[in-house]
Amino acid sequence: MMRLVAGYGPQHRGGGSRETRAWERQLIEVLLADPARVPAAAAVVTLGVMTDPALQSILSTLYAIRAGGGVPDIYALRDRLFQRDDLPDTVALAERLHDAGVEMGSEPEERAEWFDRLMKKFTALRAEASRIRPSKSTPSAETRSGDGRGVGQGA
């Protein structure tokens, strides 16, 4: 059973009034507990879907560690975050999320199921976002004339 992270308060919500979605925290928990899943998450989860700046920073840093050839685990994350003076609370948050992730899935199958549910959620969010955004293949008013000039513009 998934639980929310204790001690996760307003200071980690970017000062805004919106609540951080539980699945964002859970994604970070599972990735910190099981860094081998970072590549699979990167294929599905974009940074733009993260509403919490601290969680987005953690995810971005995990992706960057992996892209640089490192192992995106709590140790590499902590090292990177300590280098950035503007994020001292993020290190403590990452450690709490790591601990929660380790406690969450004691069996590999349990963590795999948890991760799969999260990937389905993020896939659904991506599909919903693509339905809401207008298609890029729809011609704009400027190019509908077919000659690159705006509609109604003569030679």
Image (spheres, grey):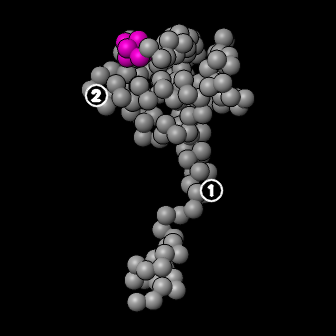
The extreme bottom residue here reads: 155
Q: Residue at x 51, y 72 (%)?
A: 140
Query: What segment is highlighted magenta in the picture?
Result: 79-84
Relative placement, left or right, of 35 versus 13 is left
* Residue 102 on image: x %, y %: 52, 13
The image's mark for residue 124 is none
Seen in the picture, residue 69 relative to 95 is either above or below; the reply is: below
Residue 36 included in the magenta stretch of the image: no
Q: Looking at the rendering, in which quadrant would you find the N terminus? A: top right
From the viewer's side, name the closer residue of 82 and 132: 82
Q: Residue at x 49, y 36 (%)?
A: 47
* Residue 113 on image: x %, y %: 55, 29
- Kindly tell me whether residue 111 is visible in this rendering: no
Q: Residue at x 39, y 83 (%)?
A: 147
Seen in the picture, residue 68 relative to 136 is either above or below; the reply is: above
Q: Quadrant of residue 60?
A: top left
Mark 1 to mark 2: distance in Å?
34 Å
Mark 2, secondary structure of its residue: loop
The extreme left residue here reads: 69
Seen in the picture, residue 69 relative to 99 is either above or below; the reply is: below
Q: Residues within 10 Å of mark 2 (few under 14, many from 20)?
A: few
Mark 1, secondary structure of its residue: helix
Residue 82 included in the magenta stretch of the image: yes
Q: Residue at x 37, y 21 (%)?
A: 72
Relative placement, left or right, of 98 versus 20 is left
* Residue 48 on image: x %, y %: 52, 40
The amino acid type of the residue labelled 2 equals Gly
The amino acid type of the residue labelled 1 equals Ile
Q: Which residue is mark 1?
A: 132
Q: Main secondary structure of the magenta part?
A: helix
The extreme right residue here reads: 17
Q: Which residue is mark 2?
A: 68
